Image (cartoon, rainbow, N blue to C red):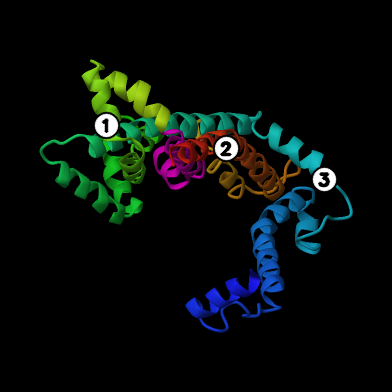
Amino acid sequence: MSDMSNAIMQSKYGAGASNKPKSKWSRPGILIALAVLTFYSIAPLWWLVVSVTKSRVELYNTNGLWFGKENHLVENFQQLFTYENGIFFKWMLNSILYAGVGSLVCMVISIMAGYSLSKFEFRGKAVEMGLVMSSFLVPTALLTLPMYLLFSGLHLTDTVWAVLIPSFVNTFDVYLAKEYIDGSVPDELLEAARVDGAGEFHIFRKIVMPLLPTPAATIFILTFVLQWNNFYLPITRLRGSDKWTLSLGPYSFMQTKQSSLFDPTTIALAGAVLSIIPLAVVMIAMQRFWKFGVALGGVKG
């Protein structure tokens, strides 16, 4: 039987098809490349974890990828938590508010807009889709001054709305939702629901949304990470430090001089370590929606 299989392979793909030797370096080479990429990805996080255990002197006089002689972890976090009566916790709550609420509203608006562009025909649809696509070419920095003047005219600068409202709409998320709905929501299902007398809002809430856990989670994650790390928007709209975020607050540490009570460098590193935790929690919490989407796609296939 094996001779017959080899004969078929040789006749179809050539004499050397079945006996082509594999390179002995292929597997070790792949493992080495993966090890290098893993180190490249983990090294910055490892450096941050190691650095937060050091004093300012040890930061500049010891190996950056290994611990110092003494552990200053508790001391650095105590300085961070007591800085200006614990304003760090206020910054964390602000970041959770801006990123959480902004991402949730952006997810709903993006899916609704993507659904309308995918499943409805209306005048100007092609123009609207063209505007969505062309908006990718506009750098965010070009919108800073017009948006600042707009919010200033509405007397919304130095308020939470100056950060929240711009995060509610993201054209890339609209395009992402539209493309996913094109392939995941069958027109026959919508027509059957309309024949049964279901309204459009009921169809969207009870039929469309349950089919979109994966794009919803993806849009939420992308927007959450974008808003959590957003630095340019808060620094141009917010003046009072009580409204700052975790990306802007620790930056202010580096603008202050060192005193006998705290070291701005080490507490900035401590703040950077804590700012990673909410992102990790959100990523872990969203995994089940991706798994559900993959399983649903496997059942459909």
Residue 235, position as x, y percentages in the image: 45, 43
- Residue that appears at 55% across and 38% down: 291
- Observer able to see residue 2: yes
In this rendering, which labeled residue sits more in front, label 2 or label 3? 2
- Observer able to see residue 158: no
- Residue that appears at 70% across and 37% down: 80
Q: CA distance from mark 1 to mark 2?
A: 30 Å
Callout 1: SS: helix
Q: CA distance from mark 3 to mark 1?
A: 63 Å
Contact flag, marks 2 and 3 (Cβ < 8 Å): no
Direction from residue 295 to residue 145 in the image, left or right: left
Mark 2 or 3 closer to N-term? 3
Q: Nearer the viewer, residue 229 or 127?
A: 127
Q: Which residue matches tag 2? A: 287
Q: Nearer the viewer, residue 292 or 193?
A: 193
Residue 24 drawn in magenta: no
| Amino acid type assigned to the residue bearing label 2 in the image | Gln
Q: Residues within 10 Å of mark 3 (few under 14, many from 20)?
A: some
Q: CA distance from mark 2 to mark 3?
A: 35 Å
Callout 3: SS: loop
Direction from residue 239 to residue 186 in the image, left or right: left
Magenta part of the protein: which range? Answer: 212-240
Q: Which residue matches tag 1? A: 188
Residue 51, position as x, y percentages in the image: 74, 53
Q: Classify residue 113 by image quadrant.
A: top left
Q: Is residue 58 above or below residue 93?
A: below
Q: Which residue matches tag 3? A: 72
Quadrant where the N terminus is found in the figure: bottom right
- Residue that appears at 76% across and 35% down: 78
